[in-house]
Amino acid sequence: MDLRLTALAILLWLLLSMLFGRDSVYSGRRALIKTKRAVYASFSGAADLRKTLLQVSRGMKILGGRVEPSQLVELAINVSRKKARFRGRRRMMGASMTVDYTLPKGSYFKIHFPATLRRSAAVGAFPSLKWEAVRAKLLTGRSKVALILILDSSASMMYSVRGILTALRAVEREARRYRDRVALVVCKGFGAVVAHHPSTNFNLVLSKISRIGLDDFTPLASGMYLGLNMALTERRKGYEPVLVIVSDGNANIPLEKHRRVSRFAFDPAIQSVLDVATQIAKNNIETIVVNTKHREPTTDVGDIAVSGTELLVRVAKLTQGSYVGIIG
Protein backbone atom coordinates (compact mmCIF):
# COMPACT_ATOMS: atom_id res chain seq x y z
CA MET A 1 0.00 0.00 0.00
CA ASP A 2 2.84 2.40 0.86
CA LEU A 3 4.45 1.77 -2.54
CA ARG A 4 1.19 2.59 -4.32
CA LEU A 5 0.79 5.83 -2.38
CA THR A 6 4.40 6.77 -3.12
CA ALA A 7 3.97 6.08 -6.83
CA LEU A 8 0.71 8.07 -6.88
CA ALA A 9 2.36 11.00 -5.09
CA ILE A 10 5.24 11.06 -7.59
CA LEU A 11 2.79 10.93 -10.51
CA LEU A 12 0.73 13.81 -9.12
CA TRP A 13 3.90 15.85 -8.53
CA LEU A 14 5.02 15.33 -12.12
CA LEU A 15 1.59 16.29 -13.51
CA LEU A 16 1.41 19.45 -11.39
CA SER A 17 4.95 20.40 -12.39
CA MET A 18 4.07 20.04 -16.07
CA LEU A 19 0.92 22.16 -15.64
CA PHE A 20 2.45 25.02 -13.64
CA GLY A 21 6.06 25.07 -14.79
CA ARG A 22 6.27 24.83 -18.55
CA ASP A 23 9.44 26.88 -18.81
CA SER A 24 10.97 25.77 -15.52
CA VAL A 25 13.08 23.25 -17.43
CA TYR A 26 15.18 26.25 -18.51
CA SER A 27 15.59 27.57 -14.96
CA GLY A 28 19.13 28.75 -14.37
CA ARG A 29 19.78 29.59 -18.00
CA ARG A 30 21.86 32.66 -18.85
CA ALA A 31 20.37 33.09 -22.31
CA LEU A 32 17.25 31.80 -24.05
CA ILE A 33 16.20 32.07 -27.71
CA LYS A 34 12.93 30.53 -28.88
CA THR A 35 11.73 30.29 -32.47
CA LYS A 36 9.03 28.25 -34.17
CA ARG A 37 11.56 25.62 -35.23
CA ALA A 38 14.21 25.57 -32.52
CA VAL A 39 15.20 26.53 -28.97
CA TYR A 40 18.60 27.74 -27.74
CA ALA A 41 19.45 27.92 -24.05
CA SER A 42 22.83 28.56 -22.44
CA PHE A 43 23.58 27.50 -18.88
CA SER A 44 27.14 28.82 -18.93
CA GLY A 45 28.50 30.59 -15.89
CA ALA A 46 30.73 32.88 -17.97
CA ALA A 47 30.47 36.52 -16.92
CA ASP A 48 30.80 37.86 -20.48
CA LEU A 49 28.28 35.45 -22.08
CA ARG A 50 26.02 38.18 -23.48
CA LYS A 51 28.99 39.99 -25.01
CA THR A 52 30.18 36.74 -26.59
CA LEU A 53 26.71 36.04 -27.98
CA LEU A 54 26.57 39.48 -29.59
CA GLN A 55 30.02 39.04 -31.13
CA VAL A 56 29.45 35.62 -32.69
CA SER A 57 25.87 36.32 -33.86
CA ARG A 58 26.80 39.54 -35.64
CA GLY A 59 27.42 37.77 -38.95
CA MET A 60 24.41 35.44 -38.75
CA LYS A 61 22.35 35.52 -41.94
CA ILE A 62 18.62 35.52 -41.28
CA LEU A 63 16.59 34.66 -44.39
CA GLY A 64 13.11 36.17 -44.54
CA GLY A 65 13.20 37.00 -40.84
CA ARG A 66 13.50 33.31 -39.91
CA VAL A 67 16.22 31.71 -37.85
CA GLU A 68 16.92 28.19 -39.04
CA PRO A 69 17.80 25.44 -36.52
CA SER A 70 21.20 25.05 -38.19
CA GLN A 71 21.91 28.72 -37.41
CA LEU A 72 21.31 28.16 -33.70
CA VAL A 73 23.58 25.09 -33.81
CA GLU A 74 26.21 27.25 -35.51
CA LEU A 75 25.73 29.94 -32.85
CA ALA A 76 26.16 27.43 -30.03
CA ILE A 77 29.32 25.98 -31.60
CA ASN A 78 30.86 29.41 -32.15
CA VAL A 79 30.10 30.55 -28.58
CA SER A 80 31.60 27.38 -27.08
CA ARG A 81 34.67 27.52 -29.34
CA LYS A 82 35.29 31.14 -28.41
CA LYS A 83 35.10 30.29 -24.70
CA ALA A 84 37.30 27.22 -25.14
CA ARG A 85 39.84 29.19 -27.17
CA PHE A 86 40.04 31.84 -24.45
CA ARG A 87 40.52 29.16 -21.78
CA GLY A 88 43.26 27.54 -23.84
CA ARG A 89 44.88 30.91 -24.48
CA ARG A 90 45.22 31.48 -20.75
CA ARG A 91 46.89 28.07 -20.43
CA MET A 92 49.39 29.04 -23.14
CA MET A 93 50.67 31.95 -21.00
CA GLY A 94 50.03 34.64 -23.60
CA ALA A 95 51.73 33.05 -26.61
CA SER A 96 50.29 34.51 -29.82
CA MET A 97 50.17 33.93 -33.55
CA THR A 98 49.05 35.96 -36.58
CA VAL A 99 45.71 34.81 -37.96
CA ASP A 100 44.68 37.83 -40.08
CA TYR A 101 45.18 41.57 -40.50
CA THR A 102 43.20 44.63 -39.43
CA LEU A 103 43.35 48.42 -39.35
CA PRO A 104 45.96 49.74 -36.89
CA LYS A 105 44.70 50.81 -33.48
CA GLY A 106 46.64 52.71 -30.84
CA SER A 107 50.19 54.00 -30.92
CA TYR A 108 51.95 50.63 -30.95
CA PHE A 109 51.15 47.72 -33.26
CA LYS A 110 52.87 45.12 -35.43
CA ILE A 111 52.73 45.75 -39.19
CA HIS A 112 51.32 43.03 -41.42
CA PHE A 113 53.71 43.57 -44.37
CA PRO A 114 52.01 41.39 -47.04
CA ALA A 115 48.63 43.07 -46.47
CA THR A 116 50.25 46.52 -46.31
CA LEU A 117 52.07 46.03 -49.62
CA ARG A 118 48.93 44.69 -51.32
CA ARG A 119 46.91 47.67 -50.13
CA SER A 120 49.64 50.09 -51.19
CA ALA A 121 49.60 48.61 -54.70
CA ALA A 122 45.79 48.72 -54.80
CA VAL A 123 45.70 52.48 -54.09
CA GLY A 124 48.47 53.14 -56.63
CA ALA A 125 51.07 54.30 -54.11
CA PHE A 126 53.58 51.44 -54.48
CA PRO A 127 56.58 51.51 -54.02
CA SER A 128 55.82 54.48 -51.76
CA LEU A 129 53.89 53.85 -48.58
CA LYS A 130 50.96 55.90 -47.30
CA TRP A 131 49.47 55.72 -43.84
CA GLU A 132 46.04 54.64 -45.11
CA ALA A 133 47.65 51.55 -46.67
CA VAL A 134 49.19 50.31 -43.42
CA ARG A 135 47.65 47.16 -41.98
CA ALA A 136 48.32 45.67 -38.53
CA LYS A 137 48.65 42.04 -37.54
CA LEU A 138 45.61 40.43 -35.94
CA LEU A 139 47.05 38.33 -33.14
CA THR A 140 45.44 35.61 -31.11
CA GLY A 141 46.54 33.00 -28.63
CA ARG A 142 48.03 29.80 -29.97
CA SER A 143 45.20 27.82 -28.43
CA LYS A 144 43.47 25.43 -30.79
CA VAL A 145 40.14 23.68 -30.40
CA ALA A 146 39.26 20.02 -30.81
CA LEU A 147 35.61 19.68 -31.83
CA ILE A 148 34.38 16.22 -30.80
CA LEU A 149 31.02 15.23 -32.30
CA ILE A 150 29.04 12.53 -30.48
CA LEU A 151 26.19 11.30 -32.67
CA ASP A 152 23.59 8.67 -31.93
CA SER A 153 22.14 6.63 -34.77
CA SER A 154 18.46 6.69 -33.80
CA ALA A 155 15.77 7.09 -36.44
CA SER A 156 15.13 10.75 -35.56
CA MET A 157 18.62 11.61 -36.77
CA MET A 158 17.61 11.25 -40.42
CA TYR A 159 15.56 14.47 -40.20
CA SER A 160 18.34 16.55 -38.63
CA VAL A 161 21.57 15.41 -40.28
CA ARG A 162 21.22 18.01 -43.03
CA GLY A 163 20.96 20.84 -40.49
CA ILE A 164 23.97 19.55 -38.55
CA LEU A 165 26.00 19.37 -41.76
CA THR A 166 24.97 22.94 -42.67
CA ALA A 167 26.11 24.22 -39.28
CA LEU A 168 29.45 22.40 -39.50
CA ARG A 169 30.12 23.78 -42.98
CA ALA A 170 29.46 27.26 -41.63
CA VAL A 171 32.10 26.92 -38.88
CA GLU A 172 34.59 25.11 -41.11
CA ARG A 173 36.22 28.28 -42.47
CA GLU A 174 37.22 29.61 -39.06
CA ALA A 175 38.30 26.14 -37.97
CA ARG A 176 40.69 25.93 -40.91
CA ARG A 177 42.14 29.32 -40.05
CA TYR A 178 42.95 28.24 -36.50
CA ARG A 179 43.94 24.69 -37.53
CA ASP A 180 41.27 23.24 -35.26
CA ARG A 181 40.66 19.50 -35.19
CA VAL A 182 37.42 17.58 -35.49
CA ALA A 183 36.53 14.04 -34.44
CA LEU A 184 33.45 11.84 -34.76
CA VAL A 185 32.09 9.34 -32.21
CA VAL A 186 29.04 7.28 -33.20
CA CYS A 187 26.67 5.67 -30.68
CA LYS A 188 25.36 2.51 -32.32
CA GLY A 189 24.28 -0.94 -31.22
CA PHE A 190 25.37 -1.69 -27.66
CA GLY A 191 28.37 0.65 -27.55
CA ALA A 192 30.18 3.53 -29.22
CA VAL A 193 32.97 3.65 -31.79
CA VAL A 194 35.37 6.30 -33.03
CA ALA A 195 34.35 6.84 -36.65
CA HIS A 196 37.02 9.52 -37.17
CA HIS A 197 39.99 10.29 -34.95
CA PRO A 198 40.84 13.99 -34.38
CA SER A 199 42.21 15.63 -37.52
CA THR A 200 41.89 18.86 -39.52
CA ASN A 201 40.06 17.10 -42.37
CA PHE A 202 36.54 18.52 -42.01
CA ASN A 203 35.39 17.23 -45.41
CA LEU A 204 36.06 13.62 -44.46
CA VAL A 205 34.06 14.00 -41.24
CA LEU A 206 31.15 15.59 -43.12
CA SER A 207 31.07 12.73 -45.61
CA LYS A 208 31.08 10.16 -42.79
CA ILE A 209 28.20 11.88 -41.01
CA SER A 210 26.05 11.72 -44.15
CA ARG A 211 26.67 7.95 -44.38
CA ILE A 212 25.73 7.02 -40.81
CA GLY A 213 23.30 4.11 -40.68
CA LEU A 214 20.24 4.10 -38.42
CA ASP A 215 19.75 1.86 -35.41
CA ASP A 216 17.10 1.18 -32.75
CA PHE A 217 19.54 1.33 -29.83
CA THR A 218 21.03 4.47 -28.29
CA PRO A 219 24.10 3.83 -26.08
CA LEU A 220 24.39 7.56 -25.39
CA ALA A 221 26.37 7.16 -22.16
CA SER A 222 29.00 5.05 -23.96
CA GLY A 223 29.43 7.73 -26.63
CA MET A 224 29.71 10.49 -24.03
CA TYR A 225 32.26 8.50 -22.02
CA LEU A 226 34.33 7.80 -25.14
CA GLY A 227 34.12 11.49 -26.06
CA LEU A 228 35.19 12.48 -22.54
CA ASN A 229 38.32 10.32 -22.70
CA MET A 230 39.14 11.68 -26.16
CA ALA A 231 38.66 15.25 -24.87
CA LEU A 232 41.11 14.69 -22.02
CA THR A 233 43.65 13.22 -24.46
CA GLU A 234 43.29 16.21 -26.79
CA ARG A 235 43.73 18.61 -23.87
CA ARG A 236 47.03 16.94 -22.98
CA LYS A 237 48.11 17.50 -26.59
CA GLY A 238 47.41 21.24 -26.33
CA TYR A 239 43.92 21.34 -27.87
CA GLU A 240 41.01 22.70 -25.85
CA PRO A 241 38.08 20.27 -26.37
CA VAL A 242 34.46 21.07 -27.18
CA LEU A 243 31.94 18.22 -26.98
CA VAL A 244 28.92 18.36 -29.32
CA ILE A 245 26.34 15.76 -28.30
CA VAL A 246 23.69 15.15 -30.99
CA SER A 247 20.85 12.88 -29.90
CA ASP A 248 17.10 12.56 -29.35
CA GLY A 249 17.74 11.76 -25.68
CA ASN A 250 16.06 8.35 -25.77
CA ALA A 251 18.99 6.54 -24.17
CA ASN A 252 18.29 2.83 -23.69
CA ILE A 253 21.72 1.18 -23.24
CA PRO A 254 23.65 1.84 -19.98
CA LEU A 255 27.39 1.66 -19.52
CA GLU A 256 28.58 -1.89 -18.83
CA LYS A 257 30.88 -0.82 -16.01
CA HIS A 258 30.69 2.56 -14.39
CA ARG A 259 30.84 4.16 -10.98
CA ARG A 260 27.72 6.10 -10.02
CA VAL A 261 28.79 9.57 -8.98
CA SER A 262 25.90 11.27 -7.21
CA ARG A 263 22.90 11.07 -9.53
CA PHE A 264 19.99 8.67 -9.29
CA ALA A 265 17.46 7.66 -11.92
CA PHE A 266 15.09 4.73 -12.18
CA ASP A 267 16.46 3.84 -15.62
CA PRO A 268 20.12 2.65 -15.53
CA ALA A 269 20.68 4.04 -19.06
CA ILE A 270 19.60 7.51 -17.91
CA GLN A 271 21.62 7.19 -14.73
CA SER A 272 24.72 6.38 -16.81
CA VAL A 273 24.19 9.50 -18.92
CA LEU A 274 23.87 11.71 -15.83
CA ASP A 275 26.98 10.16 -14.27
CA VAL A 276 29.09 10.81 -17.37
CA ALA A 277 27.72 14.36 -17.60
CA THR A 278 28.88 14.92 -14.01
CA GLN A 279 32.38 13.73 -14.95
CA ILE A 280 32.40 16.08 -17.95
CA ALA A 281 31.46 18.96 -15.66
CA LYS A 282 34.23 18.09 -13.17
CA ASN A 283 36.78 18.27 -16.00
CA ASN A 284 35.40 21.67 -17.09
CA ILE A 285 34.87 20.69 -20.73
CA GLU A 286 32.78 22.92 -23.00
CA THR A 287 29.64 21.02 -24.02
CA ILE A 288 26.87 21.57 -26.57
CA VAL A 289 23.76 19.39 -26.51
CA VAL A 290 21.71 19.21 -29.73
CA ASN A 291 18.30 17.58 -29.33
CA THR A 292 17.02 16.36 -32.70
CA LYS A 293 13.54 15.71 -31.29
CA HIS A 294 12.69 18.61 -28.99
CA ARG A 295 9.22 18.58 -27.48
CA GLU A 296 7.33 21.30 -25.58
CA PRO A 297 6.00 21.80 -22.96
CA THR A 298 8.60 20.44 -20.58
CA THR A 299 9.27 20.80 -16.90
CA ASP A 300 12.25 20.51 -14.61
CA VAL A 301 11.96 17.19 -12.77
CA GLY A 302 15.44 17.13 -11.27
CA ASP A 303 17.34 13.91 -11.81
CA ILE A 304 14.20 11.96 -12.76
CA ALA A 305 14.13 12.51 -16.52
CA VAL A 306 10.69 11.84 -18.00
CA SER A 307 11.48 12.44 -21.67
CA GLY A 308 14.46 12.74 -23.98
CA THR A 309 14.16 16.53 -23.92
CA GLU A 310 14.33 16.69 -20.13
CA LEU A 311 17.32 14.36 -20.05
CA LEU A 312 19.29 16.40 -22.59
CA VAL A 313 18.45 19.70 -20.91
CA ARG A 314 19.62 18.13 -17.66
CA VAL A 315 22.93 17.20 -19.32
CA ALA A 316 23.35 20.80 -20.53
CA LYS A 317 22.68 22.07 -17.00
CA LEU A 318 25.11 19.66 -15.34
CA THR A 319 27.90 20.57 -17.77
CA GLN A 320 27.02 24.30 -17.73
CA GLY A 321 26.86 24.09 -21.49
CA SER A 322 24.47 25.04 -24.28
CA TYR A 323 21.26 23.35 -25.40
CA VAL A 324 19.77 23.49 -28.89
CA GLY A 325 16.39 21.80 -29.37
CA ILE A 326 15.21 21.19 -32.93
CA ILE A 327 11.41 21.14 -33.16
CA GLY A 328 10.22 18.73 -35.82
Image (cartoon, rainbow, N blue to C red):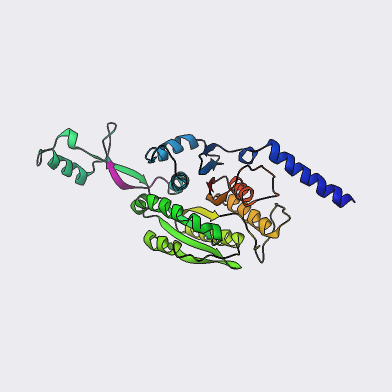
Is residue 243 visible in the rendered image? The answer is yes
Q: Is residue 32 magenta?
A: no
Which residue appears at 39% of the width and 38% of the height? 64
For this view, does 54 lie left or right of residue 315?
left
Q: Give the extent of the magenta segment.
A: 93-101
For this view, does 326 lie left or right of residue 113?
right
Above or below, comparing residue 183 to residue 104 in the picture: below
> Which image quadrant for residue 182?
bottom left
How many numbered marks have been drawn onto this rendered protein structure?
0
- Percent x, y of residue 90: 45, 45
- Percent x, y of residue 239: 44, 55
Which residue appears at 61% of the width and 68% of the height? 190
- Percent x, y of residue 320: 57, 45
Which residue appears at 29% of the width and 45% of the height? 100
Which residue is at the front of the view, 304 or 309?
309
Is residue 232 visible in the rendered image? The answer is no
- Percent x, y of residue 232: 52, 58
Q: Is residue 99 magenta?
A: yes
Which residue is at the front of the view, 178 or 194?
194
Q: What type of secondary structure mainly makes up the magenta span? A: strand
Above or below, comparing residue 155 to residue 174 in the picture: below
Which residue is most to the top? 106
